[in-house]
């Protein structure tokens, strides 16, 4: 058998390729797509646009990486729970809802607005060069390019504009805010006791004297306004005779 393989090495390699390539196509590509977030299964939908499982995995992975950079001693397994992934999906849904609202309201921050936000916001100090430009190397460590970072910042500012329509409209007085918050945060317990008169009717046995005394003390409760039903008939001779016609021959006979 080894002699056959040595003699027909090219034929053997071709046969092995026929076995390996289909296996990679059916299994390797699928695993690769799953590891890179290529699962296109829809897990939610906002404004007609689906959120795929791959997008969900990518967002959660970025969340885990950001948490690990902020706390190197953090146990990453604590962030890979169904509850943590559900929080990531909820955040992604809120983001998509705000983005859909910003798109409907045509809220698109300008490039000048992006540059001003980047240069003045302290949260970007770690990725900002001394001259105010973007540090591409720091962005690359976070898996971002300058174009993708600008797009994310533009979306974040648009979402802030949507929220500011509500949060920055007016300042409520402290008393008004307290009443509103108390109505939402307070917890009240209510007890209900029902008294059915029929349940106590058999236990009441008043005497005739008690009934008479109650009647005399509350006679107004038993009074009704006076009323009468009267029917009468009016007999008018002229009205009755107006409709009677007697022939002259009958009158002569009667006379």
Image: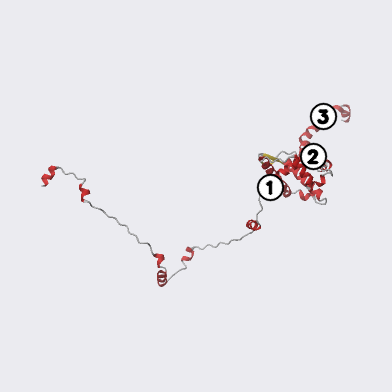
Residue 50 image point, x, y percent: 68, 40
Q: In the rendering, at what x and y percent does residue 104 appear?
A: 66, 40
Mark 2 and mark 3 lie on one chain; the one further toward the N terminus is 3
Compute the Cα span from label 3 to label 1. 66 Å
Q: In the figure, is residue 195 to the left or right of 189?
A: left
Indicate which disc, 1 or 2, sits on the residue closer to the N terminus.
2
Q: Nearer the viewer, mark 2 or mark 3?
A: 2
CA distance for labels 2 and 3: 47 Å
Residue 205: x percent and y percent? Answer: 44, 69
Residue at the (84%, 27%) spot, across then down: 11
Q: Mark 3 points at which residue?
A: 15
State the residue position of label 2.
146
Dot 3 or dot 1: first in sequence order is: 3
Residue toward you, 33 or 59: 59
Relative placement, left or right, of 216 versus 28 is left
Element type at mark 1: helix
């Amino acid at each position: 058998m080894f002699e056959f393989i040595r003699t027909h090495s090219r034929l053997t390699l071709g046969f092995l390729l026929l076995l390996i390539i289909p296996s990679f196509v059916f299994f390797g590509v699928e695993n690769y797509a799953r590891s890179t977030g290529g699962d296109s299964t829809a897990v939610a939908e906002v404004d007609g646009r689906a959120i795929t499982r791959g997008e969900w995995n990518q967002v959660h992975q970025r969340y885990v990486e950001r948490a690990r950079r902020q706390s190197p001693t953090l146990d990453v397994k604590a962030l890979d729970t169904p509850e943590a992934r559900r929080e990531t999906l909820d955040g992604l849904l809120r983001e998509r809802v705000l983005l859909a609202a910003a798109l409907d309201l045509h809220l698109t921050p300008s490039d000048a607005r992006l540059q001003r936000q980047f240069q003045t916001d302290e949260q970007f100090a770690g990725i900002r060069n001394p001259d105010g430009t973007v540090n591409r190397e720091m962005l690359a460590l976070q898996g971002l390019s300058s174009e993708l970072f600008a797009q994310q910042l533009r979306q974040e500012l648009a979402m802030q504009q949507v929220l500011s329509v509500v949060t920055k409209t007016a300042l409520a007085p402290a008393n008004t805010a307290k009443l509103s918050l108390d109505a939402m945060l307070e917890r009240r317990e209510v007890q209900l006791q029902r008294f059915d008169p029929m349940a106590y009717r058999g236990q009441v046995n008043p005497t005739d004297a008690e009934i008479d005394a109650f009647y005399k003390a509350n006679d107004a409760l038993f009074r009704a306004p006076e009323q009468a039903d009267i029917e009468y008939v009016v007999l008018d001779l002229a009205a009755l005779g107006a409709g009677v016609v007697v022939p002259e021959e009958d009158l002569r006979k009667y006379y």
